Image (spheres, helix red, strand yellow):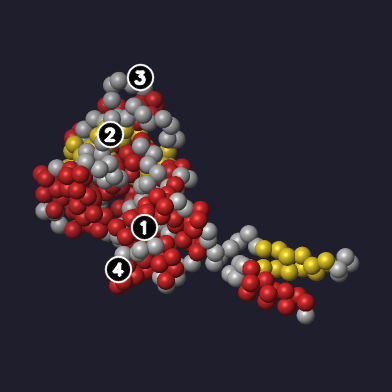
Amino acid sequence: MWNMMLRRLFNKTFIKTQKTQIYKHWESGAITFKINSMCTDTMNLDSFSVEDEKKILQVINSKRMEDLLQYSITKKRAENLECHRANNGPYKSLEDLLQVKGINNNCLHKFYKSIIYGNKGTPKKITRGLILTPKANDQKDVNTVLGVYIGSDMISWSLLNRDCEVLQWNYKCFPQTKLKGNIHSLLQITLPIAEKLPKADRYVLQDIVGNIGHHKGQSAYQAYVQESVVNAIILSYLSTSNSKFNNSMEFITNNIFILRKRILPKIYGLVVDKENIATKYMMDKLLQESDRLKKTKERLPSVLINTELKNMYNTQTPIYQEQISWSLLIALAFLELVVHQRTDMILRSDI
């Protein structure tokens, strides 16, 4: 009885929303209160300064749902925040956010802290999961990065400088019927394309080994083998055509990076219900931000693309756009996450 009465008194009078446990030590007749450290409903707003609160409200009122995902918040809660703001107007205080469906003090506290201090632990996690080989050591000497993508019927490449400006963005198609030959015919098709690839400080491609378990059927397996051969030819050409290194092994160790194919879509928010979606959404966003970046000179996780290259991309069919875009996304991911080690690069899904 005493246990129940004290629990009610404690919950109603002192700390209304904290989870409380009451223990009675029968030998000593003493009653012990224990307040759980895991508090799901309370938060001390006094821990945030006036400047912090202004910054938090500015971010929440100005950012779209997609942009809010760079902070410690789930996609569903970010959607609810944006929807509530659209229906009720801008948030005027931090307490207003508690009116949003699915929002509680605990998740808000983490969300606020990530806005103020940033997600400082994210870059190492992303980099460790992103790079398959080799280890990403100091990249301060990198001035140019070339992203190369092997598609179903084309090879695309994007050359970016250290400031994420696109210097080249091109592709070369090959008929799929010609790929159904032997290694010699693949060599004849691939080498002329490899010769067109511009020089860069770092060359970045995707891995393909992880896909072997998903290839079912003769045609799919044949496509996988052909993609592997084309990758090998390009890598061999790059490693043997660079004359400033004493041997090809030194070049491969220092200049060629392979990124995990399963991680890249997650970085750009291209995974929905465990399924990869087309890159068009992200590319449209990058193209729009490129225009804004030129006007405002802001340094964002974006890319500078000139009008000619934009027109090249926009005039392609959706199938070609998908393949062309990946070389750009590969190079940009390496620059932002490995070279610049950005703390604000959007990671839209857990790795």
Comparing labels 1 and 2, the label whose residue is closer to the camera:
1
Mark 3, other Cα within 10 Å: few <14 / some 14–19 / many ≥20:
few
Label placed on residue 162: 2
Tell me residue 193's x, y (percent). 19, 38
Q: Is residue 142 left or right of residue 136?
A: left
Where is mark 4, residue-wise? 89
Between the C-alphas of marks 1 and 3, the distance is 56 Å
Query: Callout 2, which amino acid?
Result: Arg
C-alpha span from label 3 to label 4: 64 Å
Is disc 1 in contact with disc 2, using a CB cutoff of under 8 Å? no
Tag count in the figure? Answer: 4
Q: Quadrant of residue 123 in the image?
A: top left
Secondary structure under tag 2 reads: loop
SS assignment at label 3: loop
> For the point 31% across and 35% down, which residue is it?
203
Q: Which mark is residue 318?
A: none
Classed neighbour count for the residue bearing mark 4: other residues with Cα under 10 Å, few (<14), some (14–19), many (≥20): few
> Which residue, given by chain and number where applicable, does mark 3 sit on?
246
Q: Which residue is mark 1?
A: 57
For badge 3, the amino acid type reads: Asn
Query: Does dot 1 land on a helix, a strand or a loop?
Result: helix
Q: Position of residue 17 (x, y in %)?
A: 58, 69
